[in-house]
Image (spheres, rainbow, N blue to C red):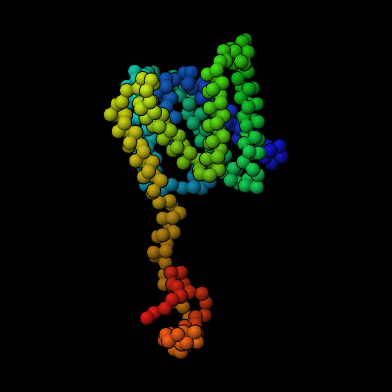
Amino acid sequence: CWQPRCMAVFGLIGTIYALGDFLEMQSMSKLGGGVYQVLLQTKLLITALMLWWLKGSRQSSLQWHVLFSMFLAMSCFVLVDQGSDGGSGAGSLPSMGVMCVMLKVAVSCYCAVLSEKYLKAFSDMPLYAKISGLATTWAMASLLMSSMEPQVQQEGFFAHWDGMTCLVALSFTIKTISTMYLLQALDSLQKNIGEALAVIVIYVSQVTLPGLGKSFELSVFLLAVLVVALVKTYLISPKVGAAKAKKQSLHAPAQDTKLVSLNSRGTALMQNIGIDTMTCEVAEALPSGVFYGMLG
């Protein structure tokens, strides 16, 4: 993990991830929870655009419509859920907070696409080595940025830490490692779709588990079902490459095959078992879709 080529790639990605965390803290301190969550849902569209820009992975027209519908459905889900809890609405939006959250979304999507690209490109290295190179600069950059905060300079980095703080830090560590495994196995857009579904799983858990004080709201539940249906629609929609390949195969011109010889006696094996066959010899391999077989 300390190889120069590894640190040059994953070390830079880790530093950008740290910048995204810093922007997230700044935006959450200036915006209400509902507004922040709605703006955060734009990562589905931004990730798709960055996949197109950085990797050339295009979306079909159907996938673009489904992604936009998913963004609207998730935004409605968050707003209705926040409203049912008496959360803060949009109100007056501070421009600095909106700018921070949009920068955070852009940085997060950019890092997710880069991580997916290079986690798969460095296939000769074990995953834990790649995560180690990424996490080293991530932690160092996060410590440097947090040390610039006036309150941290006055009271120290570990001021006001308790058991819950350690639990949150542990959960973020597990989330980061799980995200890297997902990015290596899937792609960044599917990872963000999974995070959108996680919001719905949290809502269902809050409603069903006792002691969490969450009441069932039919409108929120129907929006959650809509999001799940849109995710399913996106996953089963044909990819651009697959659609083009199918279209080309349907419109492919017929290919002539040159016949060399035709033997009506067939093969000795078939004659011995009493089956009349015919042997056909062609000049080259048979075209796609044509197979060797028997006609009776």
Residue 28 picture location, percent across and down? 48, 21
Q: Residue furthest left?
A: 218
Q: Quadrant of the N terminus?
A: top right
Q: In the drawing, does residue 192 fall left or right of residue 133? A: left
Q: Which residue lies furthest to the bottom in this view?
A: 265
Q: Which residue lies furthest to the front in this view?
A: 273
Above or below: residue 108 compared with residue 238: above
Residue 198 picture location, percent across and down? 43, 33
Above or below: residue 64 compared with residue 105: below
Residue 131 picture location, percent across and down? 62, 36
Q: Can residue 243 be seen in this view?
A: yes
- Residue placed at 39% from the left, 21% from the top? 212
- Residue placed at 53% from the left, 23% from the top? 168
Find residue 74 and report its image quarter: top left
- Residue placed at 64% from the left, 22% from the top? 144
Residue 291 picture location, percent across and down? 45, 73
Q: In the drawing, does residue 149 fall left or right of residue 215? A: right
